[in-house]
Image: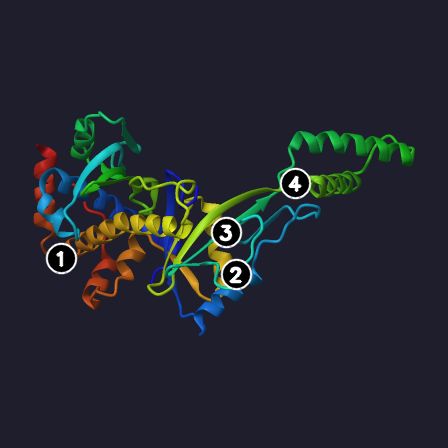
Amino acid sequence: MGLLSASTSLTRYKVDGKLEDPILDTIAAGLKNNTISDIDGNPSEQAAGWASFQDPFNSNFDGSSFMIGTYIVFALRIDKKSVPSKMIQKHFAIASAKRLKEMGRDFLSADEKRMVKDHVINMLTLKMPSTPNVFDVVWQYEIGELWFFSNLKSANEALETLFIKSFGVSLVRSIPYTMAAMDPRMTAKEQDLLHKLSASQQN
Amino acid sequence: MLDIAVAYNRYTFLGNEFLTWIWFLIEKDQDTLRQCAQDPLELSVGNRMVLVNRWANGMETVTIKGDAAGLEEGLLALSKGAWVTELNLVFKSGALQWQFSIKGESLNFSSLKLPETGNAEQMDDMEGLILDKLYLYEKPFQLIDALFRKFVALRLSGTWPAAKSNMMKWIQG
């Protein structure tokens, strides 16, 4: 569900920290250095990285292609391989039988079973194509706000981790507490009251 | 600043009270609503509301769904001590209409539908289409932010007991 979808879900963030000058070069370098790497044909189970908004499967951050007006628009892509457990079970049975035949024995020890299973999982992960999930990101760096087009916990956590790694500044989720506490119009007295606040009773 | 994970749980009540207050404004205090928008607006409850009563024997959840659903069950739940934890809102400004759900615990937006714009196939100018969309996304965010600021100022002020008393009168009918 991206920003052009008919119906979207999104989480808003405040960007906490100052980007290195020149800002656009810092952003471009952060995007390029952390672009998603394809994991098809290698044994990795998951990869997360930045992708182009307009072409998330052939990402290129050359020039300022990520700038639309004053907005920085790009995407977080998370590629994941998921090997069905029944497929692992089948190949484990085949590999175990082959191993027993080679060794001329009737049973495998727990360690041997674990090694066979690890080998089967690696082999299947290598062959399995990854499933990509693309989540759009809109960053208004001038006002330090970012919109992430997903409310999925795992996707939000991947975004927060990759963002600080890429740009050296962190994201703070806009939840009731942060929206109140980070409002620059809050006086010291109000901040104090906020920290002591407890739920209202209706009666 | 508190740790986010701690603050998320600790201040969930603030978001739930905020959503309940929005419903109260919609029903009884349109003037305050209008003060929070730059343009004339209409705000109404949409097709979904979830209320949770944590003080009940065990936790009680009431969900109201449907375009023509009555909200009496919601008021009844409030009168027993529940707060609104999720609210679907319809926001109109001029000829434009937005609809979205918002959760009290996170103030995240979901099922957000913007006013109609041309689609990508019809519009040669992709950048123009995206800028139109981004402009339209900002409107409900600005409204919720302005309402939230107003609510927090009220909640932290000495006038909250009187405001809460007005809400109680509305709840008790």
Q: Is residue A120 left or right of residue A64?
A: right
Q: Which residue is mark 4?
A: A129
Residue at position x 21%, y 65% in the image: A185
Q: Position of residue A200 (x, y in %)?
A: 19, 46
Q: CA distance from mark 2 to mark 1?
A: 44 Å
Which residue was labeled with disc 3? A76
Say whether disc 4 or disc 3 marks the residue closer to the N-terminus.
3
Q: Are marks 2 and 1 on the same chain?
A: no
**Chain of the residue under label 4:** A
Residue A62 falls left or right of residue B4: right
**As drawn, is B95 to the left or to the right of A70?**
left
Tag 3: amino acid: Leu
Measure the alpha-carbon separation of dots 4 and 1: 57 Å
Check disc 2 and report the residue beneath it. Answer: A31
- Label 2 chain ID: A
Work out whether A138 lies above or below B21: below
Q: Residue at x 52, y 61 (%)?
A: A31
Nearest to viewer (mark 3 / mark 1)? 3
